[in-house]
Image (cartoon, rainbow, N blue to C red):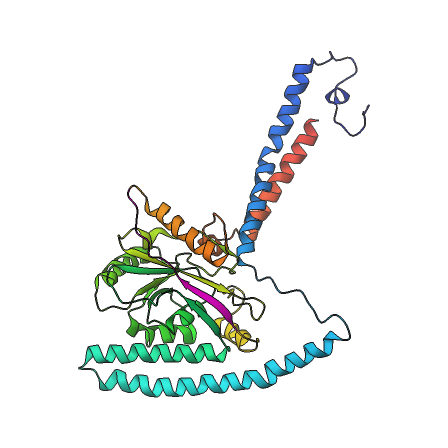
């Protein structure tokens, strides 16, 4: 059997007494070889796309700087200050905040049952107060740009989403009612008791019928003149503050004015991204409380309305573009819900087995 260099010659695999193949036939065989591997090339391209998708949900740690004998003692000193001095002070601040909040909130909630308007106003102020204590427990340095939101009907606020602390940072300035995934544990307890007074709307991502219920509640909420401004994170999941994924169209198809909010965190002091698949919210808060500070900018941007001839999807993309440009985020065309529907290892093993069998069959033919 002959071989010319590293190229595959079809004639080398034919019997010696066979009729030589014309060039056109040889070209067809090469083309068939290419078509045989096209599914594999398609899968490889899919793997590249998947890689760009997963980068949206990865926390990129900063480069280590304590690599020599001069810097390492300074790094150790920083660890001692953050964990031994700042952290106990922050725990004390948050504890005082919770004591003041709970003693006041439940007194207002039960003693002012017959005075709904006064009770709601006081509860709103108390929720803003506890959010201020939370931000103080991270040594939060938040700079707000633009006019403060006002309570108006037919108005929805949308923002990019990095962590559940986005809501806390925005709530300390304005009493928003938020649409949020229902969480277990102590966070779920707060949702069903304290945050319920703000008119918040909860959903369960695993239940498809929840979408119609949530859409109906959104329409009812924005029609109320006395309701808190409605805050929605249309990405539907936390993204690492470097990218923005597709906005869900629900907030953009009900005919309300959409007010974009852009949030950008400074990763030099703390990584505010919450990867809910790898850590609980409690652990995330402890990570923030043992960092130097949470530094971020918040921009209240120009309100937007659906243009003539514009679809809700195009409206959502236009608002996402406005937020992404202001916050310096890279737009990617992926649905954030794909984060919760990854292929199982069994599926990958089946595809690998199928590819191996096709390669073996091809070798046997040759």
In the rendered image, residue 306 lying in the magenta stretch gets the answer yes
- What's the residue at 63%, 24% (across, down)? 31
Residue furthest left in the image: 114
Q: Quadrant of residue 149?
A: bottom left
Q: Position of residue 236 (x, y in %)?
A: 41, 58
Q: Quadrant of residue 189?
A: bottom left
Query: Seen in the image, is 225 located left or right of residue 299?
Result: left
Task: Name the quadrant of the C terminus.
Answer: top right
- What's the residue at 24%, 80% (across, down)? 119
- What's the residue at 33%, 47% (across, down)? 312
Q: Nearer the viewer, residue 107 or 351?
A: 107
Task: Name the quadrant of the N terminus.
Answer: top right
How many circles with numbers are drawn on the protein? 0
Q: Position of residue 25 (x, y in %)?
A: 66, 16
Tell me if I can see residue 209 in this picture. no
Magenta: main secondary structure: loop
Q: Quadrant of residue 171?
A: bottom left
- The stretch in magenta equals 294-308
Tell me if I can see residue 87 in this picture. yes
| Above or below, comparing residue 71 to residue 25 in the picture | below
- What's the residue at 57%, 38% (across, down)? 42
Query: Seen in the image, is 68 located left or right of residue 88?
Result: right
In the rendered image, residue 311 lying in the magenta stretch gets the answer no
Q: Position of residue 37 (x, y in %)?
A: 62, 33
Q: Position of residue 231 (x, y in %)?
A: 34, 63
Query: Seen in the image, is 172 located left or right of residue 305?
Result: right
Residue furthest front in the image: 146
């Amino acid at each position: 059997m002959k071989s010319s260099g590293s190229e595959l010659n079809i004639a080398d695999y034919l019997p010696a007494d066979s009729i030589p193949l014309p060039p056109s036939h040889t070209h067809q065989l090469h083309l068939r070889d290419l078509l045989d591997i096209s599914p594999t090339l398609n899968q490889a391209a899919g793997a590249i796309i998947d890689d760009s998708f997963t980068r949206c949900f990865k926390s990129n740690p900063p480069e280590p700087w304590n690599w020599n004998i001069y810097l390492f003692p300074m790094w150790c000193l920083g660890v001692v200050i953050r964990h031994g001095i700042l952290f106990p002070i922050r725990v004390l601040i948050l504890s005082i905040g919770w004591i003041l909040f709970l003693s006041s909130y439940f007194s207002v909630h039960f003693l002012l049952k017959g005075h709904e308007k006064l009770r709601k106003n006081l509860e709103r102020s108390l929720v803003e107060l506890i959010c201020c204590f939370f931000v103080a427990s991270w040594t939060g340095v938040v700079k707000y740009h633009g006019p403060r939101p006002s309570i108006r009907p037919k108005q929805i606020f949308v923002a990019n989403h990095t962590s559940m602390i986005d809501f806390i940072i925005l709530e300390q300035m304005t009493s928003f009612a938020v649409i949020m995934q229902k969480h277990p544990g102590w966070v779920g307890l707060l949702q069903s008791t304290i945050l319920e007074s703000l008119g918040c709307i909860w959903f369960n991502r695993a239940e498809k019928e929840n979408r119609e219920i949530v859409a109906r509640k959104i329409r009812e909420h924005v029609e109320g003149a006395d309701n808190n401004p409605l805050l929605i994170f249309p990405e539907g999941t936390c993204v690492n503050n470097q990218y923005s994924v597709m906005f869900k169209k629900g907030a953009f198809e009900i005919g309300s004015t959409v007010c974009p909010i852009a949030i950008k965190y400074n990763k030099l002091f703390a990584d505010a991204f919450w990867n809910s698949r790898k850590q609980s919210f409690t652990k995330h808060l402890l990570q923030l409380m043992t960092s130097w500070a949470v530094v971020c900018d918040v921009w209240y941007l120009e309100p937007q309305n659906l243009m003539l001839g514009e679809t809700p999807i195009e409206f959502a993309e236009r608002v996402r573009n406005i937020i992404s440009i202001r916050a310096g985020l890279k737009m990617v065309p992926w649905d954030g819900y794909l984060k919760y529907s990854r292929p199982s290892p069994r599926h990958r093993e089946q595809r690998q087995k199928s590819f191996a069998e096709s390669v073996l069959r091809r070798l046997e033919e040759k």
